Amino acid sequence: MSRPLDDPGKVAQLLLNSTGEGIYGVDLDGNCTFANPASLRILGFDSDADLLGRNMHELVHHTLPNGDPYPMVECQIYLAFREGKGVHVDNEVMWRADGSSFQTEYWSYPMEQDGEMVGSVLTFVDITQRRRLETQLRNENARAERLLLNVLPAEIARQLKAQPGKTIAQQFEQITALFADIVGFTPLSARLDPAEAVDILNEVFTAFDRIAANHGVEKIKTMGDGYMAVAGAPIPRDDHCDAIAQTALEMRDWMNSRVSDDGIRLHVRIGVNSGSAVGAVIGTTKFSYDLWGDTINVASRMESSGEPGRIQVAEGTFSRLRDKYVLEPRGTIDIKGKGEMQTWFLEAPN
């Protein structure tokens, strides 16, 4: 039967020897008074004789993380006995016997004897691996954030992170939607090398992304050689129609002036409509943000029934732009699923 230890000194020594944290004490001059085995192992010394009586700041704490000298008068460890208070630091480095450094977290506490301050005791750990893992985690989180923002509008991504699993669906009373299509790209792509076709799409859609972003317009998705964007959702805005009009005109002009080494001349057909719509996140894994409703359907029909190099708008958009833009009447045309509708071509600002 084992006997309990009744010698406080032996108990303290056993605790010092068994702990995984480095622990050493310093007197009022900063010289080492004791060191446990873990501190020797972490600091790379063979025996406590290598530390006892030596100034620990000059030995293992002499330099800041940026490489600047660390004046002993500024040493946080010694605040414990200078000001009689505990100190916790996790953004400094300590130095091993071989001259290498490691990131450390330490706690320094005053040490008293018979009511008199005699020094401090320091507990420290090597947090190099922890910091490396934290950096990797931050990088992964940042990468996941970038991927999420590539899939979803920033406001929707924020809502998803704030309330994971919650159904996100909103009714928007006033939005303007834009659909754009690269005219004749399907037969063109059949004649091109796949990489060439992808390069063209990437060039065009990158330009469209830039134009949309410049006007605060939200790209919703691409569908083959088609492009959809909206203003007024997921964040409502009063100037949604103007924002889309300016975006559409700039997209048209960019396509008309596009100069390419491949000699391929491209045109875009754009359709626009304004009104109400529902926006929601669809799916639970490969989810996406989309909008639907009659306004969206008509905007899509404006594109498919339009003309190359032109921007066709329905009455919902015409009524909002008529006083500020040049709009050429096209007359009445038959719109699939809608019947006859009055449409206009958006030409330029007044």
Image: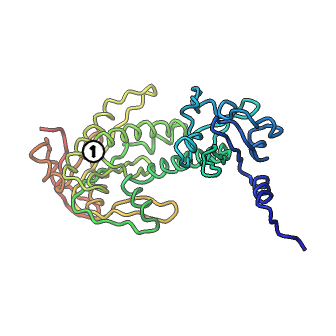
Q: How is the image coloured?
A: rainbow
* Quadrant holding the C terminus: top left
Whole-percent x, y for residue 298 in the image: 26, 59
At a point 52% along the width and 63% down the height, the residue shown is 285
Up the image or down, 69 lies above or below 325; here it is above
Quadrant of the image occupied by residue 292: bottom left
Observer-nearest residue: 82 or 230? 82
Residue reaching furthest bottom?
1
Mark 1 is surrounded, within 10 Å at the Cα level, by few (under 14), some (14 to 19) or many (20 or more) other residues, namely some
Up the image or down, 173 lies above or below 125; here it is below
Observer-nearest residue: 92 or 143? 92
Residue reaching furthest left?
323
Q: Is residue 263 left or right of residue 91?
A: left
The residue pinned by badge 1 equals 307
Q: Is residue 317 left or right of residue 106?
A: left
Whole-percent x, y for residue 317 in the image: 18, 53
Q: Is residue 344 left or right of residue 286?
A: left
**Residue type beneath disc 1:** Glu
Quadrant of the image occupied by residue 25: top right
Per the image, label 1 sits on a secondary structure element best described as: loop
Whole-percent x, y for residue 168 in the image: 38, 66
